[in-house]
Image (cartoon, rainbow, N blue to C red):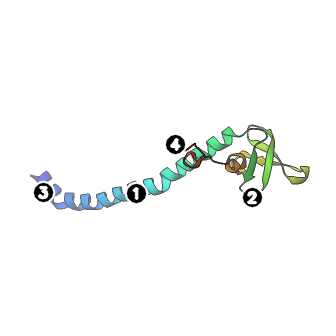
Amino acid sequence: MISTVILQAGGSNMLGTLVPMVLIMVVFYFFMIRPQVKKAKDHKKLVEDLKKGDKIVTTAGIHGRIVDMNDTTFLIEVEGGTKIRFDKTAISLDATKAAAPKVDLAKTDAPKA
């Protein structure tokens, strides 16, 4: 009987407080945490796929070509033959893949019947 009285007195109030908190956590996960994890995974894959000769853009906006690679750094050659060493986390874009033209199969010159 005492447990029934306690559940009736505080159970609904506690449930009413707990449900919005859980919903806030779920929304926070889907809008904040999950996209950041996906972005970090995509950046890691981008850096792992880079090789010597690829053109890149750093987070500082410096354009260059990869000359040498270490475990944690890239040696980048910029215009004029200047070489600069950057950490792998400073790479923002693979300009080699970004500059490659994308073929649209719907707009190709196929023979018309």
Q: Is mark 4 on a helix, strand or loop?
A: loop
Dot 3 corresponds to which residue? 5
Residue depicted at 59% across the width and 45% down the height:
42
Q: Which of marks 4 and 3 is nearer the N terminus?
A: 3
Residue 97 left/right relative to 113? right
Residue kind at label 2, given as amino acid type = Gly
Q: Residue furthest left?
A: 1
Pointer 4 residue? 113
Cα distance, mark 4 to mark 2?
49 Å
Q: Is mark 1 on a helix, strand or loop?
A: helix
Q: How far apart are marks 4 and 3 (CA)?
A: 82 Å
User: The residue under label 3 is which amino acid type?
Assistant: Val
| For residue 6, side relative to residue 40 (left or right) | left
Residue at mark 1: 27
Q: Are marks 1 and 2 in contact (CB under 8 Å)?
A: no
Q: Which of marks 4 and 3 is in front?
A: 4
Q: Which is closer to the viewer, label 1 or label 2? A: 2
- For residue 22, above or below residue 76: below
Disc 4 + disc 2, Cβ < 8 Å: no
Closer to the chain start, of discs 3 and 1, is 3
In the drawing, what numbered circle is on residue 61? 2
Mark 3 neighbour class, 10 Å CA radius: few under 14, some 14 to 19, many 20 or more = few
Q: How far apart are marks 2 and 3 (CA)?
A: 66 Å
Q: For the residue marked with disc 1, what is the amino acid?
A: Val
Mark 4 burial class by Cα count in 10 Å: few <14, some 14-19, many 20+ = few
CB within 8 Å, label 4 to label 1: no
**Foreground label between 4 and 1:** 4
